Amino acid sequence: MAGSSPQHAVDERTSLLRGRNQYPSPAPSDLPSTDPTSNFTVENSNIYTGYTDANIIITEANPEVQEANLKPSPTYGSIKNVARSTSVVTIGSGHTDQSDHIKPESPYLSGVSKKRFWVIFIMILTSYFIACFDTTIMASSHPVITSYFHSSNSASWLSTAFMLTSTGFQPLFGGLSDTIGRRRPYMFSLFVFLIATIWCALAGSMTSFILARAMCGLGAGGIITMSTIIISDLVPIKIRGIYQSYINVAFGAGQASGVALGGWIADTVGWRWEFGIQVPLVLACCLTSFFIIPERLGLASDKETNNLWQAMKGFDFMGSALLMTSTTFLILGLNLGGNIYSWTHPIVLSSLVMFLISFPLFFYVESLVARPIMPLRIITKNPRAGLIFANATSAVVLSAVNFNIPLFFQAVMLQSATNSGLNLLAPSIAASFAGVGVGFLITWTKHLKLFLVLGALISAMGCVGLSFIQRGLPTWVYLPFLMNVTVGQGLIFPTTFISILSVSEQSDQAVVASTLVLWRSIGNFIGISLSSLALQNSLIVFLNRYVHGPDRDNVIESVRKSIEVIKDLAPSYKEQVLDSYTAALRATFLIVLIISIICLVTFSKVKLPRLGKSQ
């Protein structure tokens, strides 16, 4: 540039570089004083869009060029990986080397290339599928396993042990990964799941098998939680809906495969192979995660990973212990009450009392510690508090419907367990399609609240239909109502996840994700327990009202214990019992309808920006 001063050339060059990345041009006084004849090296590194510190620096040329130090501000933003280029600017000559142009390499965050991301993502999908497969595999195979060990009366402990550990430990993984990075907790989850799966395959007693299932729950809970957190670290929020759709496919396929294949494998090659076939895939995921997941993923630039003990010093151990304790006692009380024991049984009452003591104490501790495992602002301030609450209520609705609809088909319509299960197939497939479709729609339209309200409205409409169920109608009449509920939840769950991440800072992503999963799991347990409590109490009322005859007391006692006896009752008693069950289920679904309306109102009150825009 003839006629230009050396300082003016530096100013113009710097302004062009900064303007290219939408950073304001600095004043000339901000630039270092240099000799006009010296060469300068312009070095590019990762650009954190939305971060306050500029990441383009100019240093004097020397044999050992220093890399730019990336220090993100607390403000959440996205990272665009660009090619690092080094060019020489000869001040005064006006010549610029063409190699300094910024060339985008990858749309993913944390400096991960496309190839590396897809290896990580395929591994995540595989492990997520296996964890979901293992979650439901007991549904169809537990009669074979409990009969093998001659312990059919212990069948409920298989699900209880798994749920206790999978739910109770989930929040710990989120908080811990913020302290020591994502790779270690994820690898730990995979390793625990691998050992537990081998243990299940080799278990020699019912006690050993139950303990192995508890260990499986710990690993599966960690895999599911860490998978969502890792994807949040790597995928920009604007396109995360698409990748959440793939996660939804893995979730639906895993759960459906577990239910469908569990019994078939047990009846053909033996129940031990249900776990044996998982081992090679889990082992492959373990090895892949060690080599492919970035060691510092999830850590701020100023944190060290070398000394694990030093990293753990600031971890919220007291809060973690109280949260795990309170969650465990809540699940234990809700799962055992009305199912294995009566609600007045000492174990049930003591579990619920311990929850009522430890949970408020957990909140008190979290208000005092510097780095809480569940910051109170997440569950007390909108919009995140509203999203978490509505997400939990939607889980209550779905679990209550899924728990009681099979009872209606079997007890009222007198269908077999197999046919009752087949009636749930179409609604489950519809929910999976809804979950996949909404991810793409969110990415395309950038709307979040629209799909939350739409999902809650569709679900509530289904609950309206179920609250008016009656005898004498064909099965296909009820399927649209059931499909409304499942499709509504298929829209709600992935949208809630994307929404809460979109309004959270990067530093809160792991804690927010694990908190959302925790409260959704708690909602599932509450839905089953609350609907079971409502059904049993209303059933007593309607049986006493409708059943008449000399053998009235024996009939009432027998049909409350087993629905199998209904089909063998005398015609007069059968009609009375069927009317009682229908009325009790209507009352139960009416309560579920009220909860679905609460969910709809909560979502309608939540204020959310369009995807990619700050509030």
Image (cartoon, rainbow, N blue to C red):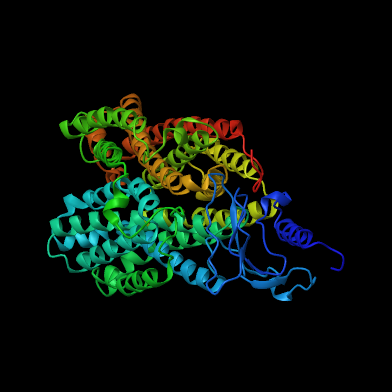
In the rendered image, the residue lying farthest to the right is 3
How many labels sit on residues?
A: 0
Q: In the rendered image, is residue 479 in sight?
A: no
Splitting the image into 4 quarters, where does residue 281 fall?
Answer: bottom left
Q: In the rendered image, is residue 201 in sight?
A: yes
Q: Where is the C terminus found, in terms of image quarters?
A: top right
Give the image location of residue 377, x and y in percent. Answer: 46, 33
Left of 500 or right of it: where is 450? right
Q: In this view of the protein, which residue sits in the foreground, 418 or 39? A: 39
Residue at (21%, 49%) from the top-left corner? 157
Q: Where is the N terminus found, in terms of image quarters?
A: bottom right
Give the image location of residue 416, x and y in percent. Answer: 36, 54
Q: In this view of the protein, which residue sits in the foreground, 21 or 171? A: 21
517 versus 552 height, above or below? below
Q: In this view of the protein, which residue sits in the foreground, 272 or 58? A: 58
Give the image location of residue 546, x and y in percent. Answer: 35, 27
Give the image location of residue 141, x and y in percent. Answer: 28, 61
Residue at (47%, 62%) from the top-left corner? 250
Q: In this view of the protein, which residue sits in the foreground, 522 or 24? A: 24
Residue at (44%, 49%) from the top-left corner? 510
368 versus 433 height, above or below? above
Left of 268 or right of it: where is 43? right
570 versus 591 height, above or below? below
